[in-house]
Amino acid sequence: MDQAISATRFACRTRPQALATLAVTAAALAWCMAAYLNRPTVPITSSGGSGGEDLRLYRRIAERVRAGANYHDAAGDELRRRGYPTGSVFNWRPPTYAWVLGAALGPLGGQVLLIAIVIAALLTAYTVERREGGRGRATAVVVLMVGAFLWCVDGDAFFAQELWAAALIALSVGGYALGRWHLGLATGLLALFFRELALPYALIAAFLAFRQGRRREAVLWAVGLALYAVFMVYHGMEVLRRITPADRVEADGWVQFGGARFLLSACGMNVLLFRLPAWVAAFYLVFSLLGLAGWRGETAARVGLTAFAYTAAFAIIGKPYNCYWGLLFAPLLPFGLVRAPAALRDLFGALRIATIRRAGVSPSVVRVSSGD
């Protein structure tokens, strides 16, 4: 492939800039390794964050909705019966998953739909990567993404709304990259209705549409976000009607400053990393982010800003058992990992060129003599 095409944004860095980037990368890796060495990451099971109890809860609520029950009545009853805190609106999930997996399709139909969304996301990712990096890199991205989506066929994990949001975000990214912004917008918004944690991606996508001057798309994002706000107001009012003085709230909240320890657990939601030591996840996470930082173009901005937004937020927010939130950004990291070698090449190349210039030799002469 042409060197100009495969070059990352680090190819034009000055020596101080390249050194600073490498220093930040080394510091991030040291931070993650310190978290690994000082305390092992919180173990999780193949069924999700709370030993599968959350997933059993979601299944039971969906089954009751399918039988004709009102979602908020069923949710309140099941949450209290199982000892969950119900004194805050944030402890009640939005009803989208129960409507889809209950009233609309049922569990089996919903699982089939989720698998179809994942397959579509994988196909778009392969197409995008093959255009830019060839079959080998496209295959590597898809294999790594499959690791993040295998939960679709693992017991009741398909009831996890984070998994639905992640699949829809991945399909949205692929849709935008292939020039199908209608698909990207629709799936991005749908991800938000499944899980409010998809809001960073939605805001980033809306911002990119506005910055690129795509007025129609920007207006549709504004309308979609407004509809989502109405939906959440409806959900909140329904919940508040059902909260009683006896309902308890979370004692310590979600702001935990879990830092690298939580990020390693979240990153480990990729099945390929799930049983490996957390230090492997440390290298995987840091070099994936480095590769995303060096990627150029609008797709790079969409994926990179989203991944960095989630890692920054989850370093602060999230209890140890909320590591399944990592599903939201796990499918995006492969785009960065396959670009990490090129990013390192360009960073060290920038140092080499700077050294040559300080020696008074033209870099172009060195390139010719070395066969570059």
Image (spheres, grey):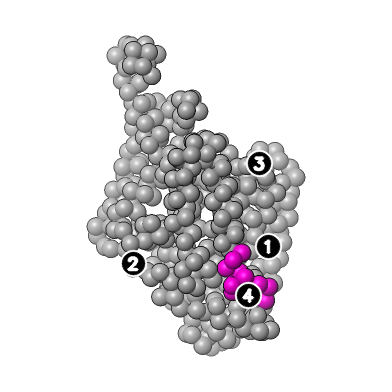
Task: Please name the residue shown 47% across and 45% down the image.
Answer: 139
- Marks 4 and 2: CB-CB under 8 Å? no
Residue 106 among those drawn in magenta: yes
Residue 210 locus on image (x, y percent): 67, 43
C-alpha span from label 1 to label 4? 24 Å
Q: Classify 10 Å Cα crowding around label 4: few (below 14), some (14-19), many (20 and above).
A: some
Q: What's drawn in magenta, residue-wise?
A: 103-113
Q: Amino acid at mark 2?
A: Val
Q: Residue furthest left?
A: 37
The chief SS type of the magenta part is helix
Residues 18 and 294: in front is 294
Rendered view: 145 above or below 99: above
Q: Earlier in the sequence, mark 3 or mark 4?
A: 4
Residue 56 locus on image (x, y percent): 50, 79
Q: Name the secondary structure under disc 2.
A: loop
Give the number of the disc on residue 216: none
- Which numbered mark, 3 or 1, is in the foreground of this view? 3
Residue holding disc 3: 179
Quarter-wise, where is residue 227 in the image?
bottom right
Residue holding disc 2: 42
Residue holding disc 4: 106
- Which numbered mark, 2 or 1, is in the foreground of this view? 2
Residue 255 locus on image (x, y percent): 44, 65
Q: Earlier in the sequence, mark 1 or mark 4?
A: 4
C-alpha span from label 3 to label 1? 25 Å
Q: Earlier in the sequence, mark 2 or mark 3?
A: 2
Quarter-wise, where is residue 226 in the image?
bottom right
Q: Earlier in the sequence, mark 2 or mark 1?
A: 2
